[in-house]
Image (tube, coloured by chain):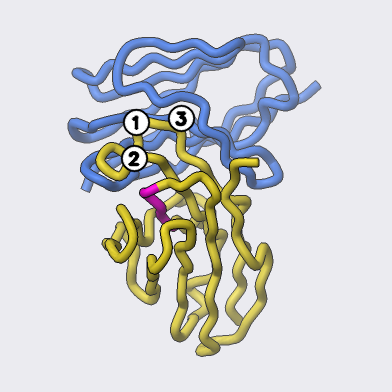
Amino acid sequence: EAQVTQNPRYLITVTGKKLTVTCSQNMNHEYMSWYRQDPGLGLRQIYYSMNVEVTDKGDVPEGYKVSRKEKRNFPLILESPSPNQTSLYFCASSPHRARPFDNEQFFGPGTRLTVL
Amino acid sequence: GIQVEQSPPDLILQEGANSTLRCNFSDSVNNLQWFHQNPWGQLINLFYIPSGTKQNGRLSATTVATERYSLLYISSSQTTDSGVYFCAVSWSLQLTFGKGTKLSVIP
């Protein structure tokens, strides 16, 4: 089954404790991205990647890191989480790096993160 | 960056009613998509529609790119239509979402 998976689905952590949210897709997609969703703000793009070893900042990259060492995986890293990073996070993938939004985007199920 | 505004922010409908959701955007875009987020948080792509009109069952969408707006029509609404509807516009390699319209369909 074609899908985007995220782990963990729920996480409660404390300020400053490094964490990684994994994202994996099994569709051989080139384009992957991370979003955060906050009440009343919609989804905002954090980082995106056009291909292996190619990543770029979205609208709200501060406090986050990403890597793309393999085509299927795109982990989101919070080196020192803070309470303002409490949010619902979505990973998404799309087949074509040149025009990623001309096709259906596949979204993961979301990761609800709480930073105390 | 591009601004995306959706209206209304909240909408309550009786089952069977029709509705129109609007999305305005501030600049030229490559593409426009509509998404539905169900009450369990799952995001579903409904349409990608840079211009013109598309229909899928009870849902249809129209984008008038020259006037920078898009409309999503829901006919004969059902309780399963409840959730948040997002409009998102793409420019370059980024996607910008509006804040959404929260739709509640009551029996």
The magenta stretch spans residue A32: yes
Residue at 56% over, 59% down: A88
Chain B drawing hue = blue
Q: Main secondary structure of the magenta part?
A: strand
The residue tagged with tag 2: helix, strand or loop? loop
* Real-space Cα separation, disc 2 to disc 3, in angstroms: 19 Å
* Pointer 3 local density, CA inside 10 Å: few below 14, some 14–19, many at least 20: many
Q: Tell me, for residue A96, which label it has, or none.
A: 2
User: Seen in the image, is B15 located left or right of residue B58?
Assistant: right
Q: Does B44 sit above or below residue A90?
A: above
- From the image, tell me which residue sits under label 3: B34
Q: Tell me, for residue A102, which label it has, or none.
A: 1
Indicate the quadrant where residue B78 lies: top right
* Pointer 1 local density, CA inside 10 Å: few below 14, some 14–19, many at least 20: some
The answer to whether the residue labelled 2 contacts the one labelled 1, judged by CB atoms less than 8 Å apart, is yes
* Pointer 2 local density, CA inside 10 Å: few below 14, some 14–19, many at least 20: some
Residue B54 rendering spot, x and y as whole percentages: 43, 12
Q: Look at the image and give the residue range highlighted in magenta.
A: A30-34
Residue at 38% over, 28% down: B23
